[in-house]
Amino acid sequence: GENVEQHPSTLSVQEGDSAVIKCTYSDSASNYFPWYKQELGKRPQLIIDIRSNVGEKKDQRIAVTLNKTAKHFSLHITETQPEDSAVYFCAASKENYGQNFVFGPGTRLSVLP
Amino acid sequence: AAGVIQSPRHLIKEKRETATLKCYPIPRHDTVYWYQQGPGQDPQFLISFYEKMQSDKGSIPDRFSAQQFSDYHSELNMSSLELGDSALYFCASSPGLSYNEQFFGPGTRLTVL
């Protein structure tokens, strides 16, 4: 089955700096890769996703890159703000009806003012 | 916009009791997923339903069962509760057509004493 690894487990950056979180996956059939942000005790919220037919996607300060050959994808947050502090989860899935996500273990991002 | 609704939001049970968690997907979403998230853990997939049929099964204990009803809401039934069942239980829904974005509900926090 699919296995998703995520690094680093914790990340502290100064406000205004960039943050990068990296994930690798094992199943070459996976083709949908979402990123979720989760604040303490709250629901995971989708912040950006990418499908395997695309190498990069950007939404304002957030971007995701995908390398299908190497089976890794990364989240890039630029101009970080204190409200970006949260746990970020990457996930991998095969697009099909009812295909579940396999989540990475999460990265706790702290943005220091 | 309407979101996924879960009830109850908090539930306290004794060991060996039963619990029922309910999930109401976003209107016109026909796919429902259940996840269990322990403290400091990533969400672990339990089970999913598409068009009222089980579509995928993860690490769901035999003591748990679930179903999706004709109105697409889903219920997770948990019996012989154990201390280790204490967790956040998330339901997510998806349009279930050609893409796989999952939108999470607010979660049910189950505490087993």
Image (cartoon, coloured by chain):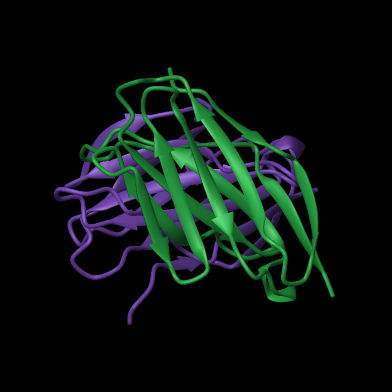
The location of residue B85, given as percent across then percent down, is: 67, 40
Most foreground residue, A101 or B76:
A101
Quadrant in the picture for the N terminus of chain B: bottom left
Quadrant in which residue A81 is drawn:
bottom right
The location of residue B86, given as percent across then percent down, is: 71, 46
Outermost residue, right side: A113
The location of residue A64, given as percent across then percent down, is: 45, 51
Quadrant in which residue A93 is drawn:
top left
Any idea which chain is the purple one in this picture? B
Vertical position of residue A111 compared to residue B21: above or below = below
Quadrant in which residue A53 is drawn:
top left
> Which residue is at a point 22% across and 57% down the rendered structure image?
B95
The location of residue B48, given as percent across then percent down, is: 34, 40
Vertical position of residue A82 compared to residue B78: above or below = below
- Judged left or right of residue A51, residue A107 is right
Can residue A101 be seen? no
Task: Give the colour in which the image draws chain A.
Answer: green
- Judged left or right of residue A109, residue A5 is left
Can residue B62 be seen? yes
Most foreground residue, B33 or B82:
B33
Most foreground residue, A16 or A93:
A16
Vertical position of residue B20 compared to residue A27: above or below = below
- Judged left or right of residue A8, residue B73 is left
How many callouts does the rendering have? 0
> Which residue is at a point 74% across and 52% down the rendered structure image?
A108
> Which residue is at a point 76% across and 38% down the rendered structure image?
B83
